[in-house]
Image (cartoon, grey):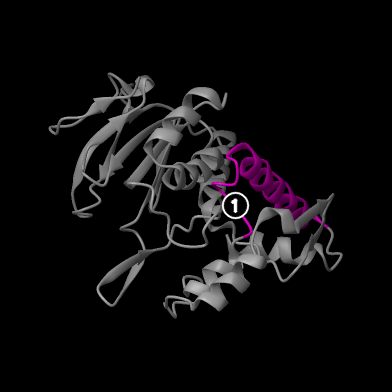
């Protein structure tokens, strides 16, 4: 997705053409999802990601002054998009990492369909997307990674022409003075989200939506995330794994989720 990020960067330089238009559309989607999630997903946390070293690999816990400065340069409110022209104020930096892989998966699915493909499975790390059903007509089965044992699965979910996107504290983190700091930052605090969940998997038809919501629901936590799923009007289902290893699924996954472990269905 680097080319799309470059496209967004090019907008403020007057770059015209398909890349700029596509990047602008992606950014507009990101800004809309930020508003819909109350800022739990935010595409303008580049300064915060840099302060923690997640964007550079130079991991560190920022000093309070550095964190405060990064907070001043973070947030979608510092982004103005007008057509294919974007303005970033107060040193803001875009970070489309929470949405770009989902967008890419969706584009791949579209290209495959346009080529006449009716059955396919696509895996992009924590993003799995399906075109249609399996060749034998049955649903695809997608394993959900165990946050405590990433080489294993704690359950599976069946999908048809849909996607599954997972965000988890185990995916990218560093340790300092015996404390683990993961990469999913809470836009409201500037720090790794402490919401009581270890991972969130989102099942949806829209890959871009699922990618953004997996991050947003992780930041929200179980209670707020479950309420959002019921009241947002957005079409998706979710699987939450809380810090005490309880698995919770939204009602729409009843009959599609399978596991040897006990789980709870949200009301």
Percent position (x, y) of residue 5? 65, 62
Q: Is residue 93 shown left or right of residue 148?
A: right
At 65% from the left edge and 59% from the top edge, which residue is drawn? 4
**In the picture shown, does residue 1 fall above or below 147?**
below
Which residue is at 48% across, 58% downward?
A: 185
Looking at the figure, which quarter contains the N terminus?
A: bottom right
Q: Dot 1, how many residues are within 10 Å of its Cα: few (below 14), some (14-19), or many (20+)?
A: many
Q: Toward the viewer: 122 or 50?
A: 50
Tell me if residue 134 can be seen.
Answer: no
Quarter of image, res 130: top left
- Residue annotated with mark 1: 42
Q: Residue placed at 44% from the left, 80% from the top?
A: 58
Q: Indicate the secondary structure of the residue bearing disc 1.
A: loop
Provide residue 20's location: percent of width, then percent of height.
77, 57
Quadrant containing the C terminus is top left
What segment carries the magenta color?
A: 17-44
Q: Position of residue 179 (x, y in %)?
A: 29, 69
In the rendered image of this protein, does residue 195 appear above or below residue 179? above
In the figure, is residue 24 to the left or right of 255?
Answer: right
Q: Is residue 19 magenta?
A: yes
Q: Is residue 189 visible?
A: yes
Question: Viewer-proximal residue, 194 or 127?
Answer: 194
Residue 109 rendering spot, x and y as whole percentages = 52, 39
| Main SS class of the magenta portion in the image | helix
Q: How many numbered discs sit on the rendered protein?
A: 1
Instruction: Identify which residue is drawn at 62% across, 37% down.
Output: 36
Was residue 29 drawn as part of the magenta stretch in this picture? Answer: yes
């Amino acid at each position: 997705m680097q080319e799309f990020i470059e496209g967004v960067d090019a907008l403020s330089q007057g770059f015209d053409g398909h890349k700029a238009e596509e990047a602008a559309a992606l950014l507009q989607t990101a800004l809309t999802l930020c508003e819909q999630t109350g800022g739990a997903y935010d595409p303008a946390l580049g300064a915060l990601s840099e302060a923690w070293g997640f964007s550079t690999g130079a991991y560190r816990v920022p000093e309070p002054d550095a964190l405060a400065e990064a907070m001043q340069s973070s947030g979608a409110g510092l982004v103005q998009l007008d057509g294919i022209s974007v303005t970033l104020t107060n040193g803001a930096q875009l970070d489309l990492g929470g949405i770009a892989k989902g967008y890419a998966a969706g584009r791949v699915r579209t290209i495959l369909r346009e080529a006449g493909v009716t059955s396919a499975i696509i895996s992009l790390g924590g993003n799995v997307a399906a075109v249609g059903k399996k060749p034998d007509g049955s649903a695809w089965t997608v394993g959900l990674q165990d946050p405590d044992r990433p080489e294993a699965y704690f359950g599976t979910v069946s999908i048809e022409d849909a996607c599954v996107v997972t965000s988890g504290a185990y995916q990218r983190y560093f340790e300092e003075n015996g404390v683990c700091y993961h990469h999913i930052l809470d836009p409201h605090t500037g720090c790794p989200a402490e919401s009581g969940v270890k991972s969130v998997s989102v099942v949806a038809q829209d890959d871009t939506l699922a990618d953004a919501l997996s991050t947003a629901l992780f930041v929200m936590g179980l209670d707020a995330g479950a309420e959002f799923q019921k009241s947002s009007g957005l079409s998706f289902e979710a699987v939450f794994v809380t810090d005490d290893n309880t698995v919770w699924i939204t009602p729409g996954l009843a009959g599609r989720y399978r596991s040897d472990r006990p789980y709870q269905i949200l009301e």
